[in-house]
Image (cartoon, grey):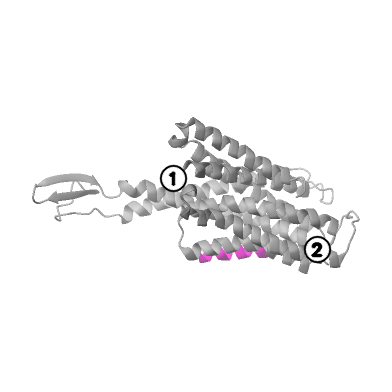
Amino acid sequence: MSKLILFYLLLLVLPLSAFAECSCETQPEERNKTKALKFKLVAICTILIASGLGVSLPIVGKKIPTLNPENNIFFMIKAFAAGVILATGFIHILPDAFESLTSPCLGQKPWGDFPFTGFVAMLSAIGTLMIDTFATGYYKRSHFVKARPLSGDEEQQGEHEGHVHVHTHKTHGHAHGSAFVADDSGSEDLLRHRVISQVLELGIVVHSVIIGISLGASESPKTIKPLVAALTFHQFFEGLGLGGCISQAKFKSRAIAIMILFFSLTTPFGITIGMGISNIYKENSPTALIVEGLFNSASAGILIYMALVDLLAADFMNPRMQSNLRLQLGAHLSLLLGSGCMSLLARWA
């Protein structure tokens, strides 16, 4: 967890390099530092509350019987959240990355000669797949190496190694069974949920810092005002998706608190950074465009992969959903509703 925290902190610091000299004219906008500052302070408070509330609801909701992962309604909530994350990647982040890396403010070579946005998104999706599979494979190998067969009467471990031998002395009964097959599938699912939640938060954190810096660096009340409401809903819906994954990962309380804090604080932290560098930050400078474009591309690849493979495919191919037509229809409707709501927010953010 300490290495993960260090990596997150590194991601928070890297975007600071995006305030290079401007080489392309920015469009004139109405500037009012005092009024803009008020909107920024409101944005920090509302986004912080919305983020914390969104990511905490599924975790606290485990105590509510209706929101228990075993209930059908939980499948529909997860489908809604997955739709939000999918739309975030496709509608919010990827177009911004294309816009940044194809800007006329960048030179034709190499940025105009190669589709770096799609390339970086593809690499990040493949990287996410590799993390997913290697982590699961490592767990399986270490699990079976460390596992030891149990013996009721200290029987010899020969051909029956890897099985539990249970003798009942009154009846002289003899039973064989795997020492670790029973809960192995549950342990593997738990590991996958933990990998999914951490990688998903990584993708969201990268995007959240960038949008926070962009909002904080702006001094136009006309630009900031609609962003405050849009980003508040944006972070709330994203929090629901992340919180659902964290709740299934069954982390310890300390780890859960750290993940909630990271998600809740990244956008307000980005806004604070933007406010601090607003005098030197130029959104159309080559360095700013390249940093934002590459980070957004990587974030989009992570979120799209996670939404399609680890969230939607896993649930929609679940035998429980496959055998229940009403649940299938409800989940598909929730997916469309979640992706539709998040896509609608692209009108303002």
Disc 1 target residue: 70
Q: Is residue 167 left or right of residue 126?
A: left
Name the residue located 74 percent from the left edge and 48 percent from the top edge: 96
Q: Is residue 11 above or below residue 242?
A: below
Secondary structure mostly seen in magenta is helix
Disc 2 target residue: 281
What are the residue bounds of the magenta stretch? 1-13
The magenta stretch spans residue 6:
yes
| Residue 123 percent across, percent down from the top left | 61, 46
Mark closest to the chain's N terminus, 2 or 1 = 1
- Badge 1 amino acid: Glu
**CB within 8 Å, label 2 to label 1:** no
Q: What kind of element bears circle 1?
A: loop
| Quarter where residue 330 is shown | top right
Question: How many circles with numbers are drawn on the protein?
Answer: 2
| Quarter where residue 145 is shown | bottom left
Q: Is residue 325 above or below residue 288?
A: above
